[in-house]
Amino acid sequence: METRVTARSARVSNTLTFKSGLSLWLVIWLLACRCAPGQACPRLCVCYHMPMTVSCQSQNFTAVPAGVPYDSQRVFLQNNRITELRADSFGFETQVLWLYSNNLTWIEAGAFSNLRVLEELDLSDNPSLRRLDGGAFRGLERLQSLHMHRCHLTELPADLFHKLYSLQFLYLQENQLSHLADGLFSDLVNLTHLFLHGNRIRVLSENAFRGLVNLDRLLLHDNRIRQVHRRAFRDLGRLTILYLFNNSLQELPGQALKDTSSVQFLRLNGNPWTCGCEARSLWEWFRKARISSSDLTCSSPAPRKGQDLRFLRELDFALCPVPDPGSLAGTTTTTFSTKTRWWFSKNKPASSSKSHFHKSSETLKAFPFTSVKHPSSSSSSFSSKYDLTAEEAALPKLEPEEYWANYGNEDAASVPCFELECPPGYDSPILPSSSSPSLLSFLSLTALTLSFHLLFG
């Protein structure tokens, strides 16, 4: 009998111990979840745990609701009517904050300074948010993704992104930005994606993208860009995607693209390209580039309208002055191709190796578009964008068959001379010797006339 009482007491004791333990674990779980109805979750919101999420979307809130649990990892406030964000609006710590599709008109400097661990902030589709204070994002040093597209933003303060060292994705498309302040992105050393399409940007300055050393893709299409500084992309050595289509570009410095040595996908279509001498550096860059590119349809000059800039010939630029690669100021010097220098070296007067190449009046008439001054005249007319010297006017266009025979092989044995002077005893396999003046004069005039017709239709 005594044994049965002892056993029953033991069972009761074990049961009480189990219930006590279960109750303790339940209390701990409730404290950990912090989601008791009516206490941890704001009115009209729905709360979830693991991870702690507070969803207050589409409830017509005009301000950030009070009572959001401090340890909420995700807070959804989209599709409301919130108008302002002040420094005391956020009394909680979160990693994801969505505020898109509200009526935001103003964000006070330091409004997000309490959100020290915030990683994603979505402010998109707030069409009344036309401007931002410089310190609006102060304290968000862990922010990785920032959405501000379709906000009708007209300008961005130069210090807006100050110390956002962790930012990787920046969405600024479909606003009304007309310019980018110098050094605007200089602190965004880890940014990989920058979306600026659908704005009103007109000029890309030298320091517009300074500091973006890890940028992978840059979307600038559907703007009004008409000018790109030759060093605008100098920090974009890791860029793989560049979109500049549907802008107002007539020319683009080849040096700008040389700085984007890793680019793989380039779209430049939908621009009114000018395919005169100003296009030479871009054309030369395309000759060496191995990328996926859109077409570049010429809009001018008239003889080249409709042609693709990428597929023009070297002879189309034979008489063009090109930028001096040693000059940052962009001064020009006249540079000729190997074939052109070789022709000139074989046909210059024997009396002077580098003196002016005097042409007869008949020869000058073959080039009415130049500003070459006849020795007997005191004035000259300017009907070309560039001044051509007598030496430049004397340069011919080679026959297409001769050009394509050595295309891509400038150093072929048939063209061994790289300077105006050829080695003694050099004999041309193509052109006759300069010892036949009458034949040389005839061939020179014929070549010059052919050059004019090929270049100007």
Image (cartoon, rainbow, N blue to C red):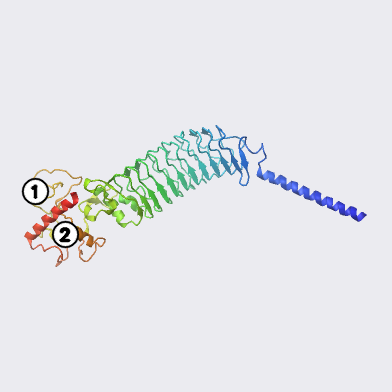
Query: Quick one: 56 or 115, which is closer to the camera?
Result: 56
- Badges 1 and 2: C-beta atoms under 8 Å apart? no
Q: Give the structural element (helix, strand or loop) at label 2.
A: helix
- As drawn, 280 above or below 43: below
Residue at the limit of the structure toward the front, as seen here: 306
Mark 1 packing: few (<14 Cα in 10 Å), some, or many (20+)? few
Residue type indicated by callout 1: Pro
Q: Give the x, y percent position of residue 111.
A: 52, 37
Query: Quick one: 248 or 73, which is closer to the camera?
Result: 248
Measure how far apart labels 1 and 2 are at the Cα level.
24 Å
Residue depicted at x 16% and y 59%: 343
- As drawn, 59 above or below 284: above
Q: Give the x, y percent position of residue 344.
A: 16, 58
Quadrant containing the N terminus in the rendered view:
bottom right
Residue at the limit of the structure toward the bottom, as seen here: 425
Q: If you read the primary sequence from the N terminus, does the residue marked by circle 1 or circle 2 appear first?
A: 2
Residue with the mark numbered 1: 375
Dot label at residue 429: none
For residue 331, say whether it is visible: no
For residue 297, say whether it is visible: yes
Q: Give the x, y percent position of residue 404.
A: 23, 60
- As drawn, 30 above or below 287: above
Mark 2 packing: few (<14 Cα in 10 Å), some, or many (20+)? many
Q: Give the x, y percent position of residue 107.
A: 50, 35
Question: Which mark lies nearer to you, 1 or 2?
Answer: 2
Query: Quick one: 199 or 453, which is closer to the camera?
Result: 453
Residue depicted at x 21% and y 54%: 318
Residue type indicated by callout 2: Trp
Query: Quick one: 387 or 80, which is closer to the camera?
Result: 80
Q: Give the structural element (helix, strand or loop) at label 1.
A: loop
Residue with the mark numbered 2: 343
